[in-house]
Every structure is written in structure tokens, then in C-alpha cells.
Image (cartoon, grey):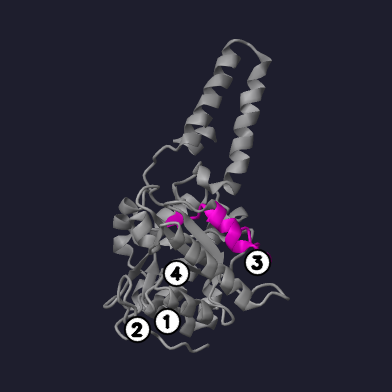
């Protein structure tokens, strides 16, 4: 065991974007996937093993336990218990990267940050959010739930037409998805992919629901040619249930290279959408006042977040 560990039909006018790439809603052919590119994606997505600091800690604990075993000391149970706790806690601490490589932030030098929005699209928030981002000429990455994309296709088109990026956030956003079998993980992530390719895109970045990971996710990412992106700057909004003070909490944590996360969903009862938008705008202005530049997620991390298709294969020929 230890050796394995180590070795959302709302219409929004589509404004052409002057930021990033140019997305043409009329030029896509909507493929389901491009299997022959998976190996190339894997090579660019860091699926080869690369040790993180936590791996060295784990090895050190294991070696300490072995040394104590040789010495016949009962104290060997202390490093073994610490190692077991490390393994149990790792799924809830994705930035530790115990089980698989994960993008948590961009370079700390360069003065750039990225905005990301989870759980959308939502007809109550997405249209106004897109207008706000246009107002400030800011681009963002939206990690989309497949079921919501099917329910609100015009919102997905608007997100893309305005120059933003889209990532995969699973099909249904099961909060305990990472506690389920590998087959279920694959089904959820692949279903979201097949939903989004109807818009002419194939996300390469996946953000797990609730930010939890597990060892079974690594082979799924490898099979789909994807990689994981989480964040290092959150306002602890509990899915927009705790909006007051959101901007202050984020601005206390933001620094160069930060991946900032918000939730693109209607706030809890009693909280106006405008209040939430005001917090987002405060963050945008606060980041700028700190001399930081907000860029596309792909620019920050140096790898594509999604692929755009213009002349792709027929979906019926690519489904597996």
C-alpha cells in the first residue's frame, strides 16, 4: 500500500472578446473526444511521477519505522501511526499532492493571479457576472457542472463567446464523489466531458467537487488526458452561503500566483445576488490595487485549460 502511494435556456448577448483566444460559436463541430491526443496530453499534463515534499516526509517516516523495528523498539508504532494519518488526511488536503500531481497555484514571481468560478452556470448569477467581468476587462475560468450546462446551454455559449475558459467540475457535483469507485469517477467526469464537447470544447482541467481527491483519480485523469486544478485562495463562502466579508477574506490571502475561487451559483436565501457581485468586484479592484494582474488561468499556470475544436470527428464515431 505504502509503496503504491509513493512509487446549468437563458439568453445573453454574446459579446466578442478582445481577451485571450477568439471563440466562434458557428465554427465548431462538437466532437466527443480525440482519443489519439490522449498520450500527448498526458505528456504535457505531468502524469509522470514527480515527488512532492510530502512523499519525502512519508519515506522518512517509513525509514524511521524500519530503523526502530531493527532496534526492536515499540516506538516504531509512532511513525507508522503518523504515516497512516498522513494517508488518511491526504484526500482532504489536495495541495499536498500525495496521490497525484495537482496544480494549486501559478508562479509566485510575475505578479499574476487567476479568477475561477465553480458550480455554474446559474441563470441568477452567470449573466450578471459576465457583465461584471466585461466591465473590468477580466477573464476567468469557469469549472462547469455538466447537468447545469445541459439545462442552460446559452450560458455556456456566452461564457465562451466572451473569452473565458471552461473546465470540468463533474456531471452532477456529487459531494462525496471522491469516496466512490473508480468506475463512478470515470463516469462522472467523462459524462461532463461529453456534455461540454457539444459546445465545441474539451476541457483538459478538472476540479474535483469539494476539492477532495483520492488515489483512484490518477488513472482516470491519465485515461482522459486531463489534469487537476484546485486553488490556493478561497473566501470560505460555503457555496455562497457566507457572502458577507468574502472579499476581505480573499484579499487577506491573495498573493502572486494565486488561483482564486468563487462559486457561480445563487447565494443562500436572504442574500442578494448584487451583494455577492459587489464582493467579487471588490476582489477584482483589490487585486489591481495590489499591483497584481488578473489573467486567464491557462496563462497563469502555463498549460491549456481546454481545447477548441473547429473540424473534429463525428461524435458517433468517437464515443466509447
Q: Nearer the viewer, mark 4 or mark 1?
A: 1
What residue would you read off at disc 3?
Answer: 243
Camera-side residue of 50 and 161:
161
Q: Residue furthest left?
A: 311
Q: Residue furthest front?
A: 289
N-term mark: 2 or 4: 2
What residue would you read off at disc 4?
Answer: 193
Tag 4, which secondary structure? helix
Residue 157 circle label? 1
Mark 1, other Cα within 10 Å: few <14 / some 14–19 / many ≥20 = many
Q: Nearer the viewer, mark 2 or mark 4?
A: 2
Q: Is residue 197 left or right of residue 184?
A: left
The magenta region covers: 227-252
Name above or below for residue 293 compared with residue 219: below
Residue 38 circle label? none
Name above or below for residue 43 compared with residue 130: above
Mark 2, other Cα within 10 Å: few <14 / some 14–19 / many ≥20 = some
Amino acid at each position: 500500500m505504502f509503496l503504491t502511494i509513493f512509487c446549468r435556456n437563458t439568453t445573453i448577448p454574446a459579446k466578442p472578446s478582445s481577451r485571450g483566444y477568439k471563440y466562434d460559436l458557428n465554427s465548431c463541430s462538437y466532437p466527443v473526444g480525440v482519443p489519439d491526443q490522449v498520450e500527448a496530453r498526458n505528456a504535457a499534463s505531468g502524469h509522470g511521477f514527480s515527488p512532492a515534499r510530502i512523499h519525502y516526509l512519508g519515506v522518512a517516516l517509513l525509514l524511521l519505522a524500519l530503523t526502530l523495528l531493527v532496534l526492536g523498539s515499540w516506538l516504531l508504532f509512532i511513525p507508522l501511526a503518523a504515516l497512516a494519518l498522513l494517508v488518511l488526511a491526504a484526500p482532504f488536503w489536495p495541495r499536498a499532492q500525495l496521490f497525484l500531481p495537482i496544480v494549486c497555484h501559478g508562479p509566485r514571481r510575475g505578479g499574476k493571479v487567476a479568477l475561477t468560478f465553480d458550480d455554474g452556470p446559474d441563470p441568477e448569477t452567470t449573466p450578471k457576472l459576465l457583465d461584471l467581468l466585461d466591465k473590468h476587462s477580466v477573464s476567468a475560468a469557469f469549472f462547469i457542472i455538466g447537468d447545469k450546462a445541459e439545462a442552460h446551454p446559452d450560458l455556456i455559449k456566452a461564457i465562451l463567446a466572451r473569452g473565458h475558459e471552461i473546465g470540468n467540475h463533474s456531471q452532477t457535483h456529487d459531494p462525496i464523489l471522491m469516496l466512490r469507485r473508480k468506475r463512478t469517477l470515470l463516469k462522472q467526469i467523462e459524462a461532463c466531458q461529453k456534455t461540454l464537447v457539444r459546445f465545441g470544447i474539451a476541457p483538459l482541467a478538472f476540479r474535483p467537487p469539494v476539492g477532495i481527491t483520492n488515489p483512484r483519480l490518477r488513472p482516470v485523469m491519465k485515461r482522459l488526458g486531463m489534469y487537476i486544478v484546485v486553488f490556493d485562495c478561497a473566501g470560505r463562502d460555503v457555496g455562497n452561503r457566507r457572502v458577507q466579508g468574502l472579499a476581505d477574506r480573499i484579499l487577506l490571502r491573495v498573493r502572486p500566483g494565486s488561483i482564486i475561487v468563487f462559486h457561480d451559483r445563487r447565494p443562500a436565501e436572504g442574500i442578494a445576488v448584487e451583494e455577492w457581485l459587489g464582493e467579487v468586484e471588490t476582489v477584482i479592484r483589490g487585486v489591481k490595487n495590489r499591483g497584481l494582474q488578473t489573467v486567464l488561468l491557462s496563462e497563469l499556470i502555463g498549460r491549456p485549460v481546454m481545447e477548441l475544436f473547429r473540424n473534429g470527428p463525428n461524435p458517433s464515431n468517437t464515443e466509447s
